[in-house]
Structures are given as C-alpha cells and as structure tokens.
C-alpha cells in the first residue's frame, strides 16, 4: 500500500510570512511503500510563477493550500491523499522533523542539504563510506527555535553510521565577489577561465578567516579578503596591454576570480581532510558528497575528486536551495526510521513537471507552425548542424542545470554555435556552452574517469579532439559535461547516436531553454514563445518535430505568461501582516533582526510598543554573530528605514 507525503520549502504562511523569506522555493511529492521511498515529483515554484529564484510568499494558509492542491491535482491527488507535510509550518498535516542523533546545534537547512547528498543512493549509504559536506552562502532560520552554532554541516558515514562535524563554507567568498562585481556566481565561475589574465596572489590568508558561521557572519570575513584581491589586481593590471576582446572590468574580474577559486579549493580541501581524519577514512575507498549551492562549483568538485582519489561524487542535480524540499524529505524519512532500511535512489534528474500541453500548444500557435512530423534521427542531424534548435522531452529536469529535457542544442564543431547560443540567451560571448556526450564515448573525448550525469564536474577535453569541438571548452581546456545513456534519456541518446554516426563526434552543445533572467521553460507553449522571440526555427517536443515560421516582428514578443494566478493578488494580505508589525512598533530594520533570531520570533502585539533599544541590547548579548546587524539597526531606526534594501519586496 502506498502513502504520500509532501516536503515543502516554502515561506510559512501567516503574519510572519513577511519576515521569513525563502528563495528558490520548491515542493517534493513522495510515495512510500513498505520497502521503498520514491521521489514522485519536485516542483520548483519559479517554473510556475516566472519569477527567477522565486521568493514570493504565499501569505495565508488558504492560499498555500490552494496552490499545493493545484500541484497535487496534476498528479491525480488531493489533500486527502497526503499523510503529512514536512518543512513548512502552517501547512495541513505539518510534522516537526525528528533530527538524527548528534545534530544538536546544526542548522536544519544545512542538515537537509547534507541529507540530499548522503541519502540519494541508498545502497551506497548502507554499504559504503561517504565523506559529505553541505556548503552554501548561509542557512535560513525558519525551522529553528534558537540560534544555531553550526551553519554548515559535514559528516562521515560508514555503512550508514553517521558522525557529524561542523565545516567551513567557501561559498561566502563567491558571495563577496557577487557583491563586489554585481554578477551571479555561475557567471563569475565561467569568467575565471574565459580570459587569460591572472595575478600572483598568495591565498594562504584565507586560512585566517572564520568561515564557519554561527558566531561570526562569514560574508563579513570574506568581503575584505576579496576586496584585497581586487585592489592588488587593479594595481597589477594598471598599464598592461590587455586582450581587446574583453573589457577592462572583465579582465579584472577574471583575474580576481582565479584567485577566489584557488582560495575556495583551499577551504574545501581542508574541510575534507579534517573529515577524513575524523573518520579514519581512506578516500580511495570512499565517495565524496557535496551539497548546498557551492556544490554547483564544478572546478572544486573535480579538484577534490582528483586530488584525493575518491571513488565518485554523490551530489543531486538540485544541490542548491532548489533541492531543499528533496533534502527535507530525506531528512524526515531518516528521522522517522523509514530510511535507511527502505530503498531510495535518485536514478535520474527527470522529476519536474511533465510537458503535457503539446496538442494544446500546437493548436494555439497554429499560425506559426509550418510542419509537424515524428522524430527522425536523420532529420535531427540535418537540423542541428544547420542551426541551434530547442528540445523539450517529458518531465523537466530538477535543479538549475540544463540536463537535456528543456534545452537548446547545437553543433559543437563550430565556434559560431557558442556565439549564437549566447546571443539567444543574452549572455556574454565568451561563455562556453556545456557539452552533452554519449556515456559510452565519454572517455575517448574527455578525461573523465567517472560518469557525470548532472553536469557537476569540470573535466579536461582530450587535447587530440579539442580542435574538433571548439564551442564547448573553457580557456583552460576543461568543459562542464553531461553523460547521457539510453536508459535514462532514450530519445536524446538516439539523436546523439545519429549525430555521432554522421559526423564522428558524440557530443552536442547544450544550454538551458530560457532567456537571461528567466526561469527555464517548463511547457511546450513556453518553449514555442521563446523560439519565436529568438528566431529558433525548429523545436523537438516529446518526440515530434515542429518547424516554425519565423517572423522578425516576433523578437519583441514578451515572455510567455506562466501560472502567475497562483501567486497574484496577495497585496492586501501582505500589507495587513506588514502593518501589524509596524503597529507593534517595529521598524523594518528591527523586523530584519527578528528574522535572524528565532528565539525572538513571536506574533506582533499591536497593543504594546516595542522597546527597540532593549531588543538590540538583548540581541547583541545573546548572539555576537549579529553585531553587524545591530549596528546597522542602531544607525537606522527611522520609520522609513529599509534594511536590507528592498523593504516590503
């Protein structure tokens, strides 16, 4: 008999929704039987709202129930089918998580990340040795009752027996660079290897930083360190003749990020060595598990695997907060005793919403459709060698990476493909395009001793084939590749096999099916709108080839409206909650302080005036980690204050 459960990484509905923001919100649907735990679906809310890194709260319990009911209905379920929920107080059937022994003082957010890697392969967890760490910028505190000492969790698991230990996170170094340069971490990571400019800077100073979180905010430590790198780099570059293909700022950022990347690898290596010593583990007989947003840093993952000789990598494709609901669910099943006895394996990345709208989309866009035909491998080869095309296949991939169910594909043999795909996504010309490769031919083209189905390693393109695939390689000769098998991705495997048979190259260029600043397309209709806007003449959708009439006038067409009705018209509920806090005497900066201290979280009392100076004194006395925020608060107690910037938004 099956039992269904939901694990939800949502902002809890109710008056505190304005104070407990979560980003990249998502929901996982689970089916539990007597001997198996199955991830049925993982819904990323940004795919429905159209808001990148979705942060809109659902302000009332009624709204939250209605949104989740619509998601459940897409799977033929209702609330009556759900036994319980985890992860978001205020939802029907909410259960508190039972945390594993030895985790007192650890952030639940970090433990959920840790579980997503440790438990994604149940057989490896029960029978093997895993060295794991959860490293991201910072946890949220929604599920905490008190301040936590350890923001980032590490662990050693020996045949299912887990020993926990705090670790440092390299992610705040990227957060500091993001603040300094105004670019997202993925862009900065790519820029580091896009340009040859470098500076000699000793990263040993990173060992003097406190990047553990809890008592000292790690970003406050990282900012002056990264600023010092930038200052030294500016001085070094002054007066030098630089490649005119890059701007002066790109030269600076590339050089700085090379140093930042080395510093991150130093921190990560020290973490892993400490965990190896803790467990008395030989890395050559163990797997490495990376989770949290920093686990998307392919160069660090590969550096650790190669430096220490691990057997392989256990990292889910949704390693960042887009997979928090997955980790919360696994943490819940571990806590209630279901795991590790029951089987669980994340066999592939394809657990997002299915593209069920093919017929409806073809009818809606009939005026733009020239021809619809069944998939033909030979025709696919002609199409992809002529120009980049769009590809939609079944269930969406989970996580932020393009894993070939919602992708733009192109011919890697032409550097022009890189230019075209970057233009389609309004990205910098220098960004390489990730390769997807037939798993059975990966070793001949890449120096990859391990399969990499989730694009989480940076492997070297073999020198003898590098000139045949110029669109995919970074300046250092590496590529962030994805291996494809006929078992997990049968249709794309057929397409790639045909391309290989025709060209001798078992590789295609692959990037996500979205424009800059947009979530990845989820439906066939969204993909069609993107194609029409970008002048992409062919879309393959669920095994059908759709040839489109491209009208230059479509280039100004707005993005496809998504299911915004699920989240719209909440202003009155939001303002009612907001005014309740303001009526109790809280300025916006005081409200932000409360979000960071779970022990101060309570319903606002409009009949009492908050003694804000006393609040600040109390906060500073119980938790020095918040000294920076208290200082900001004291400087800014006016009723119009906004801290952090953005206020109500």
Image (cartoon, rainbow, N blue to C red):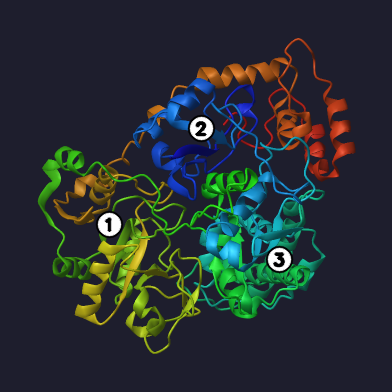
Q: Are marks 2 and 3 in contact (CB under 8 Å)?
A: no
- In which quadrant of the rendered image does the N terminus lie? top left
Q: Which callout, 1 or 2, points at the residue further toward the start of the chain? A: 2
Tell me the residue that label 1 is attached to: 391
Residue that appears at 61% across and 28% down:
18
Quarter of image, res 405:
bottom left
Quarter of image, res 96:
top right
- In the visual, does 138 lie left or right of 621? left
Residue that appears at 29% across and 51% down:
394
Which residue occupies the extreme bottom position in the image? Answer: 464
Tell me the residue that label 3 is attached to: 231
SS of the residue under disc 3: helix
Label 3 and label 1: CA atoms lie apart by 44 Å
Which residue occupies the extreme top position in the image? Answer: 607
Q: Count up the numbered dots.
A: 3
Residue closer to the observer: 114 or 576: 114
Residue closer to the observer: 577 or 346: 346
Tell me the residue that label 2 is attached to: 83
> Which mark is in front, 1 or 2?
2
Q: Is residue 192 visible?
A: yes
Placement of 106 over or under 123, stated as above or below: above
| Mark 1 surroundings: few (<14), some (14-19) or many (≥20) residues within 10 A | many
Label 1 and label 2: CA atoms lie apart by 37 Å
Residue that appears at 40% across and 50% down:
351
Residue closer to the observer: 246 or 533: 533
Placement of 75 over or under 406, stated as above or below: above
Residue that appears at 50% across and 72% down:
458
- Residue 623 lies, in percent from the top left, at 85, 41
Q: Which callout, 3 or 1, points at the residue further toward the start of the chain? A: 3
- In the visual, does 538 lie left or right of 585? left
- Residue 308 lies, in percent from the top left, at 65, 78
Q: Is residue 567 visible?
A: no
């Amino acid at each position: 008999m099956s039992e269904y459960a939901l694990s939800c990484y949502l902002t809890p509905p109710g008056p505190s929704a304005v104070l407990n923001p979560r980003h990249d919100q998502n929901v996982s649907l689970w089916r539990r039987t007597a001997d198996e735990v199955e991830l049925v679906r993982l819904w990323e809310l940004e795919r429905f709202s159209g808001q990148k890194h979705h942060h809109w709260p659902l302000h009332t319990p009624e709204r939250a129930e209605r949104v989740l009911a619509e998601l459940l209905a897409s799977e033929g379920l209702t609330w009556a089918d759900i036994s319980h929920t985890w992860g978001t107080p205020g939802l029907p059937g909410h259960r508190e998580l039972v945390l594993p022994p030895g985790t007192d003082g650890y952030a639940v957010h970090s433990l959920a990340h840790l579980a997503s890697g440790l438990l994604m392969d149940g057989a490896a967890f029960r029978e093997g040795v895993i060295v794991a760490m959860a490293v991201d910028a910072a946890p949220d505190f929604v599920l905490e009752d008190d301040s936590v000492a350890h923001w980032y969790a590490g662990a050693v698991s020996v045949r299912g027996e887990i020993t926990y230990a705090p670790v440092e996170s390299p992610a705040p170094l990227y957060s500091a660079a993001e603040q300094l340069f105004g670019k997202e971490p993925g862009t900065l990571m790519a820029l580091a290897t896009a340009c040859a400019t470098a500076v000699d800077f000793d990263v040993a100073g990173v060992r003097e930083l406190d990047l553990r979180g809890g008592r000292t905010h790690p970003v406050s430590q990282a900012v002056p360190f990264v600023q010092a790198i930038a200052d030294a780099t500016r001085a070094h570059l002054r007066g030098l003749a630089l490649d005119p293909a890059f701007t002066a700022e790109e030269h600076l950022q590339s050089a700085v990020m090379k140093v930042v990347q080395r510093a991150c690898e130093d921190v990560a290596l020290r973490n892993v060595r400490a965990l190896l010593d803790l467990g008395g583990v030989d890395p050559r007989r163990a797997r490495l598990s990376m989770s949290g947003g920093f686990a998307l840093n392919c160069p660090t993952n590969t550096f650790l695997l190669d430096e220490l000789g691990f057997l392989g990598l256990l990292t889910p494709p949704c390693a960042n907060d887009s997979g928090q609901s997955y980790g919360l669910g696994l943490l819940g099943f571990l806590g209630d005793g279901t795991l590790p006895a029951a089987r669980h394996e994340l066999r592939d990345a394809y657990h997002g919403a299915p593209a069920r709208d093919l017929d409806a989309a073809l009818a809606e866009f009939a005026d733009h459709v020239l021809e619809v035909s069944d998939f033909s491998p030979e025709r696919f080869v002609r199409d992809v060698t002529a120009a980049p095309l769009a590809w939609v296949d079944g269930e969406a991939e989970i996580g932020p990476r393009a894993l070939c169910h919602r992708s733009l594909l192109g011919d890697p043999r032409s550097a022009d493909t890189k230019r075209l795909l970057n233009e389609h996504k309004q990205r910098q010309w220098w960004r390489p395009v990730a390769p997807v490769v037939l798993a059975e031919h990966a070793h001949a083209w890449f120096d990859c001793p391990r399969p990499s189905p989730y694009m989480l390693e940076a492997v070297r393109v073999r020198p003898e084939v590098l000139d045949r695939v110029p669109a995919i390689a970074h300046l250092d000769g590496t590529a962030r590749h994805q291996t494809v098998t006929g078992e997990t991705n049968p249709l794309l495997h057929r397409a790639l096999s045909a391309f290989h048979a025709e060209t001798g190259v078992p590789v295609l260029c692959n990037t996500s099916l979205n424009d800059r600043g947009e979530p990845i397309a989820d439906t066939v209709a969204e993909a069609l709108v993107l194609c029409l806007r970008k002048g992409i003449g062919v879309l393959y959708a669920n095994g059908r080839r759709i040839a489109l009439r491209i009208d230059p006038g479509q280039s100004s067409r707005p993005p496809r409206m998504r299911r915004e009705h699920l989240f719209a018209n909440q202003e009155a509920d939001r303002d009612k909650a907001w005014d309740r806090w303001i009526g109790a005497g809280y300025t916006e900066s005081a409200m932000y302080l409360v979000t960071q201290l779970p022990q101060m979280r309570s319903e606002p009392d409009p009949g009492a005036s908050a003694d804000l100076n006393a609040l600040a004194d109390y906060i500073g006395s119980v938790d020095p980690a918040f000294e920076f925020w208290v200082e900001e608060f004291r400087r800014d107690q006016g009723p119009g204050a906004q801290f952090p910037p953005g206020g109500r938004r």
